[in-house]
Amino acid sequence: MRLTSSRLKTNFLGIELENPFILSAAPSTDELSIARRGLEAGWAGLVLKTTSMVTTRVDLAYPMMSKFDSDNRLAGMGNIDLISAYHIDEVTRRVTILKKEFPDKMIAASIMSDSQTGWQTLVKMLKDSGVDLIECSFSCPQGNVGEDPGKMLAQSESATERVAGWVKQAAGKTPVLIKITPQVTDIVAIIKAIQRAGCDGVTASNSIPALMGIDIDSLSPIPNLGGKSTYSGLTGPAIKPITLRTVAEIARNVPGMVISGNGGVADWRDSVELISVGASNVQICTAVMLHGFDIINDLTSGLDTYLQEKNYKSVNELVGKALPNIVDHDHLPRQKVRSFVIKERCIGCGRCYIACRDGGHEAIEWNGQTRLPDISLEKCVGCGLCLLTQPVAGCLELRQIAT
């Protein structure tokens, strides 16, 4: 059942959203019929998949999907997709249709080009179509617009500022988000360049270029296209920690920069984390591709229940709440903690003993009679490695002890 709650309503760059969940520019927004079903399911808006000038050649290769497993569970998805096969003329037609059918939803579109004329033409065509917001993909290779051909625009501070300025000049009052990459030495410098260009916010961030694997029998990269492959864009839960760090760095160092969080969110708990470090809303791609549009029901109900239980009146009150707890290493509290075995939950697997013996501080001895680990408080430093090995939740715990 579709949830409506005043707690979930939010204003994003002047656009009223019924909840903070947006379909990001991806295959799920690349077909009109599919995008329409997503909005009908209850998503607050969408960003149509990245489009380009009519003269841009789009040469896609298949198969394009692959996965990264951890403990037989999908941790990440790889994609060698490029941009939409639909050019700007078709995308603007869809914007007009969707705005007419869903006047209360945010209808945005993503663009990319390799020239000033191209960027500004795309923007003007989208404005004429009635688009609510324009997202610019600065996190895919952008031809010779960047200072290093083949590199991402958002890896160059000067190129980012220059091209973002072109876009905002053409966009006028229409909000512009610049979609960045975390693969830079100084993310703050890139964000400040976007700020100087006058853009309204950033999407943080995008997939991470990755080699998804090698078939060790054929030595062919994955995904296998006739024995050849290329680097994929890694998405899904595997990149959530990178997204959290990227958003937090922006929010901590560039106050006032509006952030649309994107990358690694799989459930409502992930969305709480992302919002708490500074994202004003949450874009989702991989989770929808794997589990369908109806995950919006779990996302909205879970987030709304959390807000209610924590006495937040709105999503806006949660934005950035975790930031004061993120500090530099020099400012971390120095506390004395030690690991303890909870014997009634221990199954005697010995994993903690092996980990501490070969990768920790040799603080755990194995009792052959009781088949239980014994932890030396003198040798244990409280690093927490043993907790990562526990097969049963709660069989080990860290406790603070008197100094």
Image (tube, helix red, strand yellow):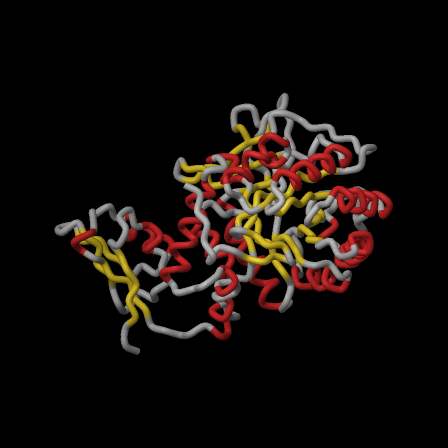
Q: In the drawing, does residue 126 fall left or right of residue 340?
A: right
What is the quadrant of residue 165 in the picture?
A: bottom right
**Residue sitting at 78 percent across and 58 percent down?**
161
Which residue is nearer to you in this view: 306 or 18? 18
**Residue sitting at 49 percent across and 75 percent down?**
331
Measured as percent of width and height from the top left, residue 322 is found at 48, 65
Which residue is nearer to you in this view: 28 or 242? 28
Q: Residue furthest left?
A: 369
What is the quadrant of residue 50 in the picture?
A: top right
Q: Residue furthest bottom?
A: 403
In the displayed structure, would residue 66 be above or below residue 22? above
**Residue sitting at 58 percent across and 67 percent down?**
252
Tally of numbered tags: 0
Which residue is nearer to you in this view: 277 or 294? 294
Where, quadrant-wise, is the N terminus in this rendering? top left
**Residue sitting at 36 percent across and 73 percent down?**
335
Where, quadrant-wise, is the C terminus in this rendering? bottom left
Q: In the drawing, does residue 32 fall left or right of residue 268?
A: right
Q: In the drawing, does residue 393 fall left or right of residue 212?
A: left
Measured as percent of width and height from the top left, residue 173 is found at 75, 57
Measured as percent of width and height from the top left, residue 344 is found at 16, 54
In the displayed structure, would residue 168 be above or below residue 88? below
Q: Residue furthest right?
A: 117
Measured as percent of width and height from the top left, residue 19 is found at 51, 51
